[in-house]
């Protein structure tokens, strides 16, 4: 990827500006704005459809390379209190997750090439005190490597008068005592005090490169209760700290007592001492994680914050690439709502940087509101984990988009399905980085077909062909604008995979339906994971995976979101199963091929007559080519009707898919005991259902329960039964005529 970029926002109203950050290895590139109608280049479909937009953006630009600087840490501004001439003590609890990953700073005020002081994990994974006077560097090492995943008390002291330095390394728990160390050595170096050098926690040092702050020697792991004292504490005092003596016992010696259990939902590291040397938490490390003193008796950090005094840092955390702006577009007032991109090109290199033009509140331009599943876009953004091996998936095309995948891996970018380099799960996602797999023309290698944004464009293209007037808005828009946004439309339509929902989003949609709104759920695995927006950094979303079908699992005691304090996991686990809202909910997934639907008795109910107008009594639905996994309308991730999980009892079961292979497996939350019979050929729960139900005041819900449904819309020039059913429902839903009342 020699040419790429991102926007400062995913949606923009007419009259507002959207800014573009670009990194270009070529010396120059050309940019223009395009409206994107269809993205998938598959020759079986309509192909890439874009319309150039006359704009102030069009033109040539000077290229420059912008770097991604990942890695989380705490930065404490320079202070004279940190210039510890007479001596000092540094103390913390650490649980390293990659101790053999090279030099890693724990608590350091260090300036390269060699001035200052700091406590580090050294190249060999052992604890080390660094002292540098600007001419030479002395390291006092523990001689014992820290153990991965084990809590350890660490401390170091230095006394100027005697020159004696001591390093203490004591694992937590009686079973690990033979891995401890206490080392004493006389040193010659006296720490220098370079000007304007911050103290860093979970990193080693920083420098300026091309005007940007570059931080190095990032720590991987949890770090709890870092403290700094202005003299070398005695061995009995160190023992008291190890026994969790309160810092007030050393009141005269305190320089800083950072307490990560305070203000957990913020980006601030609070210094609880009288000096108030508060730090800034940079690049979104995981907070609301258990500390060294967690007892296991309380699982909500808000109830026992003193047991959640740790932060889990990673060398590939990132919340914002912080690139400089290259150009911006002020959206003209009469700009049509829809999917757009900045198309940047230089020779053979190009990128389509996506964004959405949404309407202003109170000024809808169509009766259809299309909810773009941008939380799902972010959750899968830059995904490179291979959950299943390619040989299990006949359509996998692992050779696709290798430049994008290489860029993602080399720059430490992750989706919420990936693991950090230390093996822990990725709980946060940001839209302020290049997200290379939500480009309109991107094909996901594992599926061998588009997913998320490019798949959602199938519906945009279909609505254009059928003449429906529609507006597009995002999950983020719905979260913040709520019911006022939805109530402008006769019908709200979802994308193909609306998986990640916040509480305010669900509340708004439920209120919309209760008040006569109409929903077309045209995807699969919807309304699934509890998702929160960071109130302080709304461009960041958070999840905590547990209790569901997941690529990683939150640790014990770490199920609550750090940004909002709410319980994470599945909405189903909180009594809000998708069936209660849409009539169907996630039941299975598989990626070998899709299947088709057979009509059920509910489809012949007079209430459903408008849905099946023009459809034969015995007609199989969706048994033809698809742009998603090649064939069939029912597949990828699929949902089922289930009264026991909350499907409203008056819901009509319209059609059910059949013939799924054993590559389709029942979701984890349905499995009580592991045993054979979880695949599509034997398990009766492995199928997709079409469903319809009425809601109060003339509203209704139509659900397809399949990610692949939209991939069939354009088959045979848009003349097929999937297209016909979708059109029948949409035309009825946009009409002013109320739907029949809910049956009694």
Image (spheres, rainbow, N blue to C red):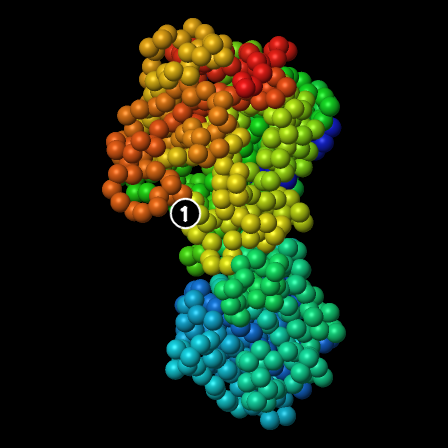
Answer with the quarter of the image where residue 639 lies. top left
Answer with the quarter of the image where residue 160 lies. bottom right
Where is residue 371 drawn, in percent x and y?
57, 28
Q: Is 344 on the left-hand or right-hand side of 87?
A: left
Q: Is residue 240 shown to the viewer in this render?
A: yes
Crowdedness near tag 1: few (<14), some (14–19) or many (≥20) residues, C-alpha within 10 Å: some
Along the line of sight, the residue nearer the viewer: 423 or 163: 423
Where is residue 265 drawn, in percent x and y?
64, 55
Residue at 55% across, 35% down: 374
Q: Residue at the far bottom: name it.
A: 162
Answer with the quarter of the image where residue 642 lies. top left
Residue at 73% across, 28% down: 15
Instruction: Give the labeled residue for mark 1.
Output: 551
Q: Residue at the far front: name it.
A: 744
Q: Residue at the far top: name it.
A: 614
Residue at 62% across, 35% down: 507
Q: Is 403 on the left-hand or right-hand side of 13?
A: left
Q: Is residue 40 shown to the viewer in this render?
A: no
Where is residue 468 drawn, in percent x and y?
57, 13
Where is residue 438 drawn, in percent x and y?
50, 35
Q: Looking at the rendering, in which quadrant would you find the C terminus?
A: top right
Q: In this rendering, is residue 719 above or below 592?
A: above
Residue at 65% across, 24% down: 515
Q: In this rendering, is residue 566 above or below 364?
A: below
């Amino acid at each position: 990827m020699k040419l790429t970029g991102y926007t400062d926002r995913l949606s923009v109203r007419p009259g507002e500006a959207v800014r573009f950050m670009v990194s270009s290895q070529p010396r120059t590139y050309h940019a223009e704005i395009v409206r994107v109608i269809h993205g998938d280049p598959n020759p079986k479909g309509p192909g890439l459809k874009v319309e150039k937009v006359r704009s102030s953006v069009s033109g040539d630009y000077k290229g420059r390379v912008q770097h991604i600087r990942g890695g989380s840490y705490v930065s404490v501004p320079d202070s004279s209190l940190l210039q510890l001439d007479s001596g000092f003590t540094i103390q913390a609890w650490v649980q390293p997750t990659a101790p053999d990953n090279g030099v890693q700073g724990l608590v350091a005020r260090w300036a390269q090439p060699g001035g200052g002081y700091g406590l580090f994990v050294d190249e060999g994974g052992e604890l080390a005190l660094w002292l540098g006077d600007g001419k030479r560097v002395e390291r006092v090492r523990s001689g014992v490597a820290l153990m991965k995943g084990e809590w350890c008390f660490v401390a170091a002291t230095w006394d100027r008068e005697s020159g004696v330095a001591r390093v203490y390394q004591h694992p937590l728990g009686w079973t690990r005592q033979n891995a401890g160390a206490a080392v004493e050595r006389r040193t010659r170096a006296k720490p220098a005090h370079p000007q304007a050098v911050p103290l860093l926690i979970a990193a080693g040092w920083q420098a300026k490169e091309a005007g940007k702050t570059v931080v190095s020697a990032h720590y991987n792991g949890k770090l709890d209760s870092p403290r700094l004292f202005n003299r070398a504490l005695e061995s009995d005092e160190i023992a008291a700290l190890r026994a969790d003596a309160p810092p007030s016992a050393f009141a005269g010696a305190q320089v800083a007592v950072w307490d990560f259990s305070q203000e957990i939902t913020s980006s601030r590291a609070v210094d609880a001492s009288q000096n108030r040397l508060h730090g800034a938490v940079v690049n979104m490390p995981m907070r609301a994680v258990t500390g060294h003193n967690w007892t296991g008796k309380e699982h909500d950090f808000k109830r026992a914050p003193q047991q959640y005094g740790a932060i889990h840092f990673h060398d590939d955390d990132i919340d914002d690439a912080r690139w400089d702006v290259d150009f911006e577009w002020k959206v003209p007032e009469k700009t049509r709502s829809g999917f757009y991109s900045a198309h940047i090109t230089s020779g053979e290199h190009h990128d389509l940087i996506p964004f959405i033009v949404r309407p202003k509140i109170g000024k809808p331009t169509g009766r259809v509101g299309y909810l773009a599943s941008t939380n799902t876009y972010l959750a899968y953004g830059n995904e490179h984990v291979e959950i299943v091996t390619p040989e299990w998936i006949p359509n996998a095309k692992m050779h696709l988009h290798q430049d994008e995948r290489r860029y993602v891996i080399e720059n430490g970018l992750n989706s919420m399905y990936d693991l950090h380099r230390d093996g822990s799960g990725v709980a946060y996602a940001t839209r302020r980085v290049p997200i290379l797999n939500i480009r309109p023309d991107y094909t996901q290698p594992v599926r061998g077909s588009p997913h998320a944004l490019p798949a959602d464009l199938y519906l945009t293209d279909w609505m254009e062909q059928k003449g429906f007037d529609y507006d597009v808005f995002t999950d983020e828009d719905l979260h913040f604008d709520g019911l006022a946004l939805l109530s402008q439309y006769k019908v709200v339509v979802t994308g193909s995979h609306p998986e990640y929902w916040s509480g305010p989003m669900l509340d708004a949609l439920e209120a919309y339906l209760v008040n006569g709104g109409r929903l077309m759920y045209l995807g699969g695995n919807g309304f699934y994971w509890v998702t929160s927006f960071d109130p302080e950094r709304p461009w960041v979303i958070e999840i905590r995976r547990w209790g569901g079908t997941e690529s990683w699992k939150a640790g014990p005691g770490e199920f609550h979101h750090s940004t909002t304090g709410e319980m994470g996991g599945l909405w189903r686990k909180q009594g809000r199963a998708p069936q209660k809202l849409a009539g169907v909910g996630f039941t299975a997934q598989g990626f070998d091929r899709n299947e088709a639907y057979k009509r059920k008795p509910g489809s012949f109910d007079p209430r459903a007559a408008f849905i099946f107008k023009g459809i034969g009594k015995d007609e199989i639905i969706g048994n033809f080519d698809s742009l998603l996994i090649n064939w069939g309308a029912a597949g990828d991730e699929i949902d089922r009707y289930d009264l026991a999980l909350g499907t409203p009892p008056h819901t009509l079961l319209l059609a059910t898919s059949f013939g799924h292979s054993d590559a389709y497996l029942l979701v984890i939350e349905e499995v009580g005991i592991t045993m054979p019979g979880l695949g599509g050929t034997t398990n009766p729960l492995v199928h997709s259902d079409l469903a319809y139900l009425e809601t109060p005041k003339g509203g209704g819900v139509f659900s397809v329960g399949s990610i692949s449904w939209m991939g069939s819309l354009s088959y045979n020039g848009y003349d097929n039964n999937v297209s016909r059913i979708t059109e029948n429902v949409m035309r009825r839903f946009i009409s002013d005529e109320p739907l029949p009342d809910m049956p009694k």
